[in-house]
Amino acid sequence: MTANEVRVRFAPSPTGFLHVGGLRTALFNFLFARNSGGKFILRIEDTDRARYVEGAVDNLINTLHWAGLNYDEGPVVGGNFGPYVQSERLAIYKKHIEMLLEKRVAYRCFCTPERLEAMRKEQERQKLQPKYDRTCLNLSENEINDNVAAGKAYVVRMRVPDNVTIKFSDIIRGDVEFSSERVDDQVLLKSDGYPTYHLANVVDDHLMEISHVIRGEEWLSSTPKHVLLYEAFGWDVPKFAHLPLLLNPDRSKLSKRQGDVAVEDYRDKGYLKEALVNFVALLGWNPGDDREIFSLQELENEFSLEKVNKSGAIFNVEKLNWLNFQHLRNKPEDEVLGMLKAHLASAGIDAAQFTDEYLIQVIDAMRERVSFVKDFTEKSPYFFSAPAAYEEATVKKRWKPQSAEYLKKLAEELSALENPSKSDYEEALHRTAAALGVGNGQLIHPLRLAVSGMGEGPGLFDIVNILGKEETLRRINSAIESIK
RNA sequence: GGCGCUAUCGUCUAGUGGCCUAGGACGUCGCCCUCUCAAGGCGAAAACACGGGUUCGACUCCCGUUAGCGCUACCA
């Protein structure tokens, strides 16, 4: 391994979409690389032909880019250690399997899946640990050659040493040890010529000079197999860091059917990449102080594996929502404007009918009331079209028998205004109320209902000012006619 | 079942033997502000799983129990 250069990889298998747990694993790798001036590598682990999903690799790459986790080496961008897709590295694995066979630390196994299945069932029945019984370890050289010559299908298994203790140190969990007695003679090369995860992973991590293996805790139990393999090859063992798992609300491993797990599900629901990244970073890591809001850049500066904790974390959507609110609020106006226009288009609203100036006023008015861009149309549809209906509960609460009459009077006052400002509207309303001899509320609430169709939202005079005099008058008249 | 990992408010977490009357954040509740809803401010309820040690002193160290999770495939 060269010098002390940090090289880490995210190694997903393309079985569908990027899982939020995968996003966090990728993020931690990315942050660690950036923080230590190292390289972040993407490697595709597509050694299971049965699980291959068309388009999954592109999807994975797109999603990673969406999140801002650009890799230094990997598919498409290339690098000096390619190819970065395991199905394109079959010859490499074959060569390394030959090495292991030669050293007699691996052996061919001709047992059929049916026999193995029966064996496991029997072991289970006897309450024994399911483990390959090494039938094929005892085959003679001649028997093996005959079988191969006869074209019998075989796998290659690792010959796990008897009765040794396998120790390794994990950056997050400290020293861990396993007895080799508990380690199965793992299949390394499948009968279809593809390597299993264990072989491909170790060979590639070595060849790609990976310095730190940062992955989910579900891999902790198979790490002894990997350590054994490194030793069998005579290679240095990389440093390991096994991340705590992301959990469902019931504390099981985060999975589909208990909510959304695909990053794109969240993207499509309107979550900002900044919020999702911030949220997922805080699941299992924190800087040790009270800060909650982080940009990717800040995370890069602050991240360290030493501060990653050991226990699983529940994916709690409410905090994510809050973070989305925070990040949306912190976004520059023109960026929100762009997102709002895109949202209007996808909501079937012609954005061209509104000037940028108008939309920016809407954004200013709604900023503190929206967590998602879609909230602009859901919480304040009245900025985009006149109310088609009036909230029943609000009518009941705010519309009095005299309201129509009051609003008529207010309309007269308003129409006399010339090029009114926000405070002009306010003063006009106060004048009208005084003339009528009623409190301002007698006009404010019905007016809000008239212009917005609902009972809540930004300050009334902000709404009226944004809508403009003509539109406000039109809406007052409609309300007088429609609300009984 | 076996092996491994883990264990602080409902949730995310701070805490590395005395600073802890256990801090922050989300959420919840109350008050203030107020034309409504938010935002904001103030405040409240809310946790060291249990039992043994070690120590002058344990949330912090050790052991055990319990619980949860992970792994236990020719899947990753």
Image: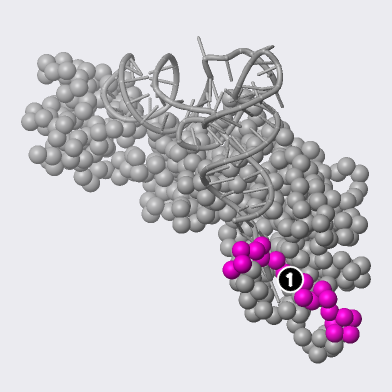
Looking at the image, which residue sits at the far bottom?
A150
Queried whether the magenta region covers residue A129, the answer comes back as yes
Residue A263 drawn above or below residue A33: below
Left or right: A461 with respect to A107?
Answer: left
Residue B35 drawn above or below residue A115: above
Magenta range = A125-144
Residue A359 drawn above or below residue A120: above
Tag 1: residue type? Asp
Q: In percent of the image, x 30 and y 40: which residue is there?
A: A382
Left or right: A27 with respect to A178?
Answer: left
| Residue A213 position within the rendered picture, expressed as x and y whole percent measured from the top left | 76, 49
Q: For the image shown, how many numbered marks are present on the structure? A: 1
Q: In percent of the image, x 61 and y 60: which residue is there?
A: A59
Which chain is disc 1 placed on?
A
Q: Nearer the viewer, residue A177 or A407?
A: A177
Left or right: A424 with respect to A92?
Answer: left
Queried whether the magenta region covers residue A438, the answer comes back as no
Q: Nearer the viewer, residue A176 or A312?
A: A176
| Residue B61 position within the rendered picture, expressed as x and y whole percent measured from the top left | 70, 29
Q: Secondary structure at mark 1?
A: loop
Q: Nearer the viewer, residue A233 or B48?
A: B48
Q: In percent of the image, x 66 and y 62: which residue is there?
A: A129
Q: Quadrant of residue B17?
A: top right
Q: In percent of the image, x 58 and y 54: which residue is there?
A: A19
Q: Is residue A370 visible?
A: yes
Q: Nearer the viewer, residue A59 or B68?
A: B68
